[in-house]
Image (cartoon, rainbow, N blue to C red):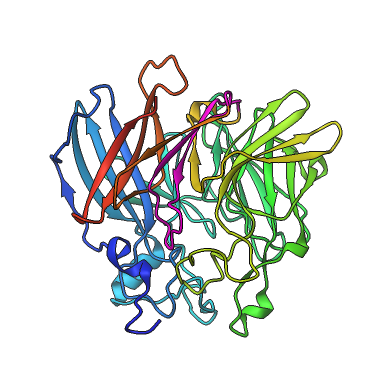
Amino acid sequence: MSATQPNPFLAGNFAPVREETQIEDLRIIGELPRDMNGMFLRIGPNPQFEPIGTYHWFDGDGMLHGVRVQDGKASYRNRYVRTKGFEIERERGRAIWSGLMELPQFDNPDGPFKNAANTALVWHDGRLLALWEGGEPHHISVPGLETLGPYDYNGKLMSAFTAHPKVDAVTGEMMFFGYAPMPPYLQYSVVSASGELLRTVPIDIPTGVMIHDCAVTEHYTLLLDLPVTFNLEAMTTGEPLLNWNPDNGARIGVIPRHGTNDDVTWFEIPPCYVFHTTNAYEDGDEVVLIACRLNSTNVLMDAGQPPQEGPPAGQEDQSPRMHRWRFNMKTGTATEEGLDDVSSEFPRINESLMGRQHRYSYSARVPAGATMPLFEGFQKYDHERGTIESHLHGKNRYGGEGVFVPRHGASAEDDGWVVTYVHDEISDSAEMVVVSAQ
């Protein structure tokens, strides 16, 4: 990008925050719930040095931002995830690895790419893991947020590790997958409640595809074989590594939790893409999936440019919207229905119901005509009544993913709060915002 056209993901509220700080007594506007205690964390890309080549908004070293709430008071700290690549670049005082829009450095003795550990977090078996779907997780201390090192399940981790594993709150098991541009294209794993990697099985799919998320039910895991495909040959000539390829078809694989490739039932669906699922559950003979559906996507093929207002001429609208699919395990048929005309992403539920039928979900609402990944509020879906409520953050205020935090001792599914960080573009300030989920 030219000097007069700076990369929008390196400017404004997206600009890197390179100082690690700690604030013990944050100013509180209103009152924090007295029965809310814990640490609210987000992770995202935050390059410690000027990037090499074209910067994509998925690039950048992982940085954790944490607000710890106790007895109505709050403190803050942020820390980089100190991966091997981070430490090498810090020692040399400059960026060594380029990002997703550039060729990997196959001649780099430290590896062709860097595990940025910048995408998502999971808490399992008493460990906080920072995730990046191209490599292994990193173990993070809590509440200090110091990096304890990469975590490979005592050498048993044999694949990449999705940014969005699923933890069954009833059994304590965690399900994850890893995808790759070369065979085996997809591997599926189960971790026990005590943190033992129990099994990894290869899943046969025709070609390498980018799979960002999955879903689980009480007995099954859902794997998404959708048409964002790898093209290694094209990348060598400067073309994108990933391409939207609807001719590849779209299908959802339903595998018994402890099953193998031979046990997968595949359901063909109209071509689409799903970055984030809401939840899945079993309803009689059917497996139900709720997720944010896009007609297509170019998010990893856009040379780091922000999304354009409206679809380009001849292309479909790429706004994500809440949808529901039903997969009949007896008849092998699939149905699909839209649940909302408003665009939203990053859906969440009360995670005690992960894999079980839920009534409520919450997603981040996208403003009409948005040219950047900005979220103006929340959509609350009542899937039992088929109703939707909206909460807006206010004029020129944009937040992130809303995480549901249950009230201690809650008797209702939505008895708790939806929490996010919000940036006020007028005052150029940031807040942790706590909204009653009811």
Residue 242, x across and y down, in percent: 62, 69
Relative vertical location of residue 43 with respect to residue 110 in this rendering, above or below: above
Residue 305, x across and y down, in percent: 46, 71
- Visible in this render: residue 258? yes
Relative vertical location of residue 97 with respect to residue 223 in this rendering, above or below: below
> Which corner quadrant holds the N terminus?
bottom left
Q: Which residue is at 60% across, 38% downward? A: 339
Q: Nearer the viewer, residue 379 or 149?
A: 379
Residue 81 lies in quadrant: bottom left
Q: Which residues are magenta?
A: 356-385
- Visible in this render: residue 145? no
Q: Which residue is at 66% across, 75% downward? A: 232
Residue 182, x across and y down, in percent: 69, 66
Q: Nearer the viewer, residue 289 or 201?
A: 289
Relative vertical location of residue 295 with respect to residue 234 in this rendering, above or below: above
> Which corner quadrant holds the C terminus?
top left
